[in-house]
Image (cartoon, rainbow, N blue to C red):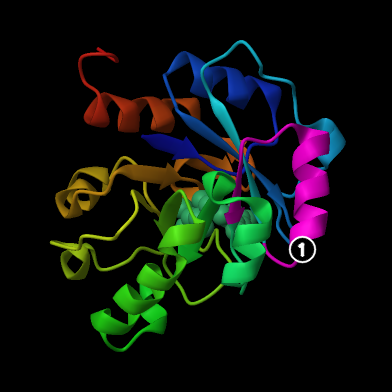
Amino acid sequence: MVKVCGMTRSQDIRTCINLGVNLLGFIFHPKSPRNTNPQDVPDLSGSPVRKVGVFVNQGAEEIARIMDTAKLDLAQLHGDHTVEACRTLGASRVIKVFWPMRYEQMDDLCRDMDRFAPVCTAFLLDAGIQSGGHGTSLDFTTLQGMAPPRPWILAGGLGPANITHALQCEPDGVDLNSGVESAPGIKDAEAIKQVMRIIRPDANP
Ligand SMILES: O=C(O)c1ccccc1NCC(=O)[C@H](O)[C@H](O)COP(=O)(O)O
């Protein structure tokens, strides 16, 4: 599963769909250079791609409203959203973000993931200790052998140069953002193509 996050331009959306990207991320966080408005998210019904909204500060009710307006399939929660907020949105619609660098012990991260597992469809593990789009990466070796109770997506500074190394921790999906950009919010089609060739060589010769 490949997600490309921070979509702001229709040509980048077309590129991703043509290359077989599975999930497109739209950021609803005014402080982000990749921020977008719910009304500007295109209708992609008829294409196999699913649309993910990225939320930091909004509560469950506002997120649900934006999901309706932008016709989003999933909400990726980048704030300190609670189990109750996830339940309100509906487990099948929630990707909960965790920051492994927040935890001194892997066991504590695992305990938090267990707590959220019943109210999420997937997890996203990002670098840093909050928010996102930092362009820095996790130490992939510390994630090897992890078995989270939900499918998990690896994020954080991923691009052509480090994707092969990143795949060694066997995530169920990868999230690409600043590592495939020429400027914030401007995707680099060639970089996305290079990553897709590494992940799915048969589909992208
Ligand atoms: O990308 C942003 O600007 C952003 C801002 C605030 C919260 C989340 C944000 N991005 C969410 C993502 O899913 C990113 O793809 C993820 O954090 C990894 O980003 P990067 O390190 O740039 O690859």
Q: Is residue 70 magenta?
A: yes
Q: Position of residue 17 (x, y in %)?
A: 51, 19
Quadrant of res 194: top left
> Residue 64: percent from the left, percent from the top?
76, 49
Q: At x 74% / y 42%, what residue is drawn?
A: 67
Residue highlighted by disc 1: 58
The front one of 166 and 147 is 147
Residue type (three-letter) at the residue carrying disc 1: Gln
Determine the residue positioned at 58% across, 45% down.
Answer: 93
Q: Position of residue 55 (x, y in %)?
A: 68, 57
- Residue neighbourhood size for the residue with mark 1, other residues' Cα within 10 Å, grouped as few (<14), some (14–19), many (≥20): some
Quarter holding the N terminus is top left
Say left or right for 64 vs 89.
Answer: right
On screen, residue 12 versus residue 197, left or right, reads right
Q: Quadrant of ligand 1?
A: bottom right
Name the quarter where the C terminus is drawn: top left
Residue 200 image offset from top left, x and y in percent: 25, 24
Q: Is 48 left or right of 154, judged from the image as shown?
A: right
The residue at the point 68 percent across, 36 percent down is 72
Does residue 135 appear in the picture of this structure?
no
User: Do we see residue 102 in this rendering?
Assistant: yes
**Element class at badge 1:** loop
For the point 44% across and 26% down, which residue is it? 21
Q: Nearer the viewer, residue 60 or 157?
A: 60
Q: Which residues are magenta?
A: 56-76
Q: Quadrant of residue 185?
A: top right
In the rendered image, residue 153 lying in the magenta stretch gets the answer no
- Which residue lies most toward the right here? 39
Query: Up-down: is 163 above or below 131?
Result: above
